Amino acid sequence: MEPDLFHQESPKEYKKAIVVGASSGMGKELVKILVKRGYNVGITGRREHLLKELKEGYPGRIFYKAFDIRDLSKTTRSIRDLIKSLEGLDLLVLSSGVGFLNEELDTEPEFQTIYTNVTAFTDIMTFTFRYFLKHPPGHLVGLTSIAALRGNKSAPAYNASKAYQSNYLEGLRQKSKKQKLKITVTDIRPGFVATDMAKGEKLFWAASPEKAAKQIYSAIRRKKGIAYISKRWGLFALLLKIAPRWMYDHF
């Protein structure tokens, strides 16, 4: 049983958020927006020097914990510590993940993807959902991908893991609505974003991390269930969903 972290609500001069995977890319840019929009923010990542650098840019507004989300012995303990530092939690954004092009189906990258995008993802989402059950209201956000919609011959584990994430978030959203909980669940589905995670040579409609973060914040503020980043990917998603299997298999 998870310990009850707070018995009384503390004064909310600032809203409180945690961004998991904030050392670079969309996560880092989202942190900057959240601070400007009245949040104190807890940030996590593996590269401590980048977290420290981001913290120093916003004195007194950012707290950090450096850890790898695949180390389950550290993850929930570190998130608890950030919640204590923030004196509560209103929003958690999970922006951390991995993906590999793996034409040869080497075992290591496939299982690294599964452990990060499935096992570690589930660990963080279940902990945070249970926290918000005890301390409502709360907003849980996962950055999945448009890759969740179909399989991919070059990155089978990545696309499959993103499908898992989207379905898991849908299950949590359904649970919240069915039980009339004050927990909002948002599935952010980016297309191509110009970050280190972007793979391949032919990237189209690639948004900058700054543009992507602005649209992510807009989806959070509007409490969207699902949002495509950038917005034009919503049309692509519709076409991808209805493409017949015989056609997609030869894509």
Image: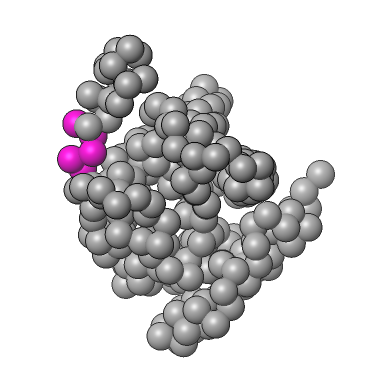
User: In the rendering, at what x and y percent does residue 196 appear?
Assistant: 40, 62
Q: Please report the bounds of the magenta region as a residue range.
A: 231-235
Q: Nearer the viewer, residue 180 or 78?
A: 78
Name the residue located 47 percent from the left edge and 84 percent from the top edge: 53
Residue 27 against residue 203 in the figure, above or below: below
- Can residue 38 be seen here? The reply is no
Q: In the drawing, does residue 249 fall left or right of residue 94?
A: left
Name the residue located 29 percent from the left edge and 52 percent from the top edge: 201
Q: In the drawing, does residue 20 fall left or right of residue 81?
A: left
Q: Nearer the viewer, residue 117 or 166?
A: 117
User: In the rendering, at what x and y percent does residue 223 appear?
Assistant: 35, 43
- Quarter of the rendering occupied by the C terminus: top left
Residue 60 against residue 181 in the figure, above or below: below
Name the residue located 64 percent from the left edge and 57 percent from the top edge: 69
- Quarter of the rendering occupied by the N terminus: top right
Instruction: Tell me where residue 89 sits by quadrant.
Output: bottom right
Q: How many marks?
A: 0
Residue 110 against residue 164 in the figure, above or below: below
User: In the rendering, at what x and y percent does residue 244 appear?
Assistant: 30, 13
